[in-house]
């Protein structure tokens, strides 16, 4: 009876760990994508700022380019930059929370294995 309860607890912890690890990888991927967006907006702004106000600037929309005033393009890039930074900050908070949850699950697993040393042998025999 206790052996079955221990096995059930282990399977729940394992499922939780797999779920949290997947979420953490997803958040890390989203952060990398937003970092790229932020950097692209920053570099575009750095190229736009030194141009004279009367310069013809074009906005890419798919395969088409539209003539836009320089100040409109600058405002769009600044907004993209700010939005990316806000999203990155939010994702960083999510990442930290997920890392804390993963640490808690790891501690739960350690406690379970310390309470039931026999289950560690069973786990090792199942994995081979």
Image (tube, rainbow, N blue to C red):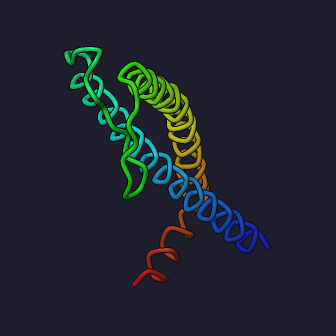
Task: Please indicate whether residue 85 sits to the left or right of residue 108 in the image.
Answer: left
Query: Where the N terminus falls, by quadrant?
Result: bottom right
- Horizontal and vertical percent position of residue 90: 55, 30
- Horizontal and vertical percent position of residue 62: 41, 56
| Residue in view at x 26 percent, y 17 percent | 49
Between 31 and 117, the residue placed more toward the observer is 31
Query: Where the C terminus falls, by quadrant?
Result: bottom left
Compared with 44, 20 (above or below) is below
Task: Please indicate whether residue 39 sits to the left or right of residue 8 in the image.
Answer: left
Between 14 and 38, the residue placed more toward the observer is 38
- Horizontal and vertical percent position of residue 25: 45, 53
Residue 94 lies in quadrant: top right
Compared with 105, 67 (above or below) is above
- Horizontal and vertical percent position of residue 103: 52, 42
Between 55 and 98, the residue placed more toward the observer is 55
Compared with 29, 57 (above or below) is above
Figure disc tally: 0
Compared with 81, 117 (above or below) is below
| Residue in view at x 28 percent, y 30 percent | 44
């Amino acid at each position: 009876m206790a052996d079955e309860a221990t096995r059930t607890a282990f399977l729940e912890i394992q499922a939780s760990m797999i779920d949290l690890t997947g979420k953490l990888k997803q958040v890390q991927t989203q952060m990398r994508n937003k970092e790229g967006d932020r950097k692209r907006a920053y570099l575009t702004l750095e190229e736009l700022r030194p141009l004279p106000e009367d310069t013809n600037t074009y906005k890419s929309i798919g395969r088409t380019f539209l003539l836009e005033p320089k100040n409109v393009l600058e405002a769009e890039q600044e907004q993209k930059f700010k939005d990316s930074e806000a999203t990155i900050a939010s994702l960083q908070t999510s990442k930290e929370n997920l890392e804390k949850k993963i640490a808690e699950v790891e501690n739960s697993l350690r406690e379970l294995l310390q309470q039931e040393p026999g289950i560690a042998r069973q786990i090792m025999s199942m994995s081979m």
